Image: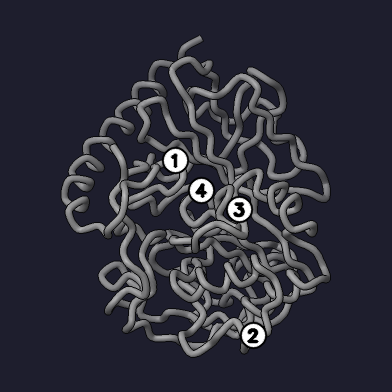
Amino acid sequence: MKHKSQISYFVMMLLVASVLSGTLLSAESNSCGPGSPRNKHQWPFSCHSIWNRPIGSKAAYIPAEIGPSPWVSAEVNYFIITTDNDPVVPWYFPLNWGPGRCELGGKLLGEIHVPHNLILSDATPTKTPNNAAAFLAPDGRTLIQMNPLTRCEPGGPVFGHPTPGPEDIYGPGITGGQGGSGLSSIGGTIRLGELLPEAPPIRHALKLLIYAHKYLYHNPPGYRWPAIRADAYAFNPDSRSRYGGSNPNLVMGALLAIPPDVTAETLGLKTIPGKKLFEVLQDYGGYIVDDTAIDTHNIAIENGVEEEFLATYGYTFGGTSGDFFDDVNQLFQALAIVQNNSESRKGGGGTPRRPLAPPLEY
């Protein structure tokens, strides 16, 4: 059964996003960096997007005061490219964050193209992943984002909280399915191949998650640009997850980076992927996008990167010990807040540490 009112509104929003991003693309494509056009699926968003903007020479660094964590883990994001041949299925608001994400009864949000065999399992009492996800619509540019994406059976409906509106893969790509901050589901995500030994340096900012109850500032508003919110429980005195940090500058949306006077040698980094992460965190930094809800340092990666990482290096991306665990803890402790990052001074302003991203392919 077609729910025409929801579909008509959704299609209208997609058209508006497409028109606006077309204007943006034509205005920005002439001021991008050198190089062959980028593949939008692998390296998305405008060359002036927050995700693609290097740290600038005028960046003002202040202490982040992040300590070591007993656990290092991954935030898995999902990017699903769809076509007109994929079935159209209902999209519902989930009734539960824990088990029961696929229970019917929530609001119908619309209908979207979804590959028939896509499955993301229900939550369990001990595992409630954020599952921030972005579907690229068949038009090749509109991103439909949600969290926690769940689908319990092939061909069935999908469940996930909606985001403020559609984003264009050619546009700024700021908002999306990271629930704590409202930031992008795929901007800042480490993609397949980017941590391989032979891969070139990563040329985009990362998405970072920390334990909000321990680190994020305990008073409102709890976020700064480019984030559009803090968690709903952030300042609830009755919540076990309420923010409890003492640093007023460490909030959702804060841009963190390793200052230029720090080196991989001074940090004693031991692993190839650890050194790759050091390089990108110094040149591009990473945005605080969500709460880990437990004491762990967390980096956002694309679905499949964990398996690729293990097959390549022989150890897991996360864990509680080992050389890579030590490296990630050193990196998080070395991070500082780029206090003057703003919409008019992305990365702190001044000369970028690296060339701007090349234009996107059409």
Q: Earlier in the sequence, mark 1 or mark 2?
A: 1
The residue singled out by tag 3 in the image is 301
Mark 1 vs mark 4: in front: 1
Which numbered tag is attached to residue 326?
none
The residue singled out by tag 4 in the image is 185
Q: Amino acid at mark 1?
A: His
Q: Earlier in the sequence, mark 1 or mark 3?
A: 1
Residue shown at the point (51%, 9%) measured from the top left: 1
- Structural distance between the alpha carbons of marks 1 and 2: 34 Å
Q: Amino acid at mark 3?
A: Ile
Q: Do callouts 1 and 4 mark residues in contact (Cβ within 8 Å)?
A: no
Mark 1 vs mark 3: in front: 1
Residue shown at the point (62%, 89%) measured from the top left: 266
Q: Amino acid at mark 4?
A: Ser
- Structural distance between the alpha carbons of marks 1 and 3: 15 Å
Which numbered tag is attached to residue 267?
2
Q: Earlier in the sequence, mark 2 or mark 3?
A: 2
Closer-to-camera residue (87/241):
87
Assign a secondary structure to mark 2: helix
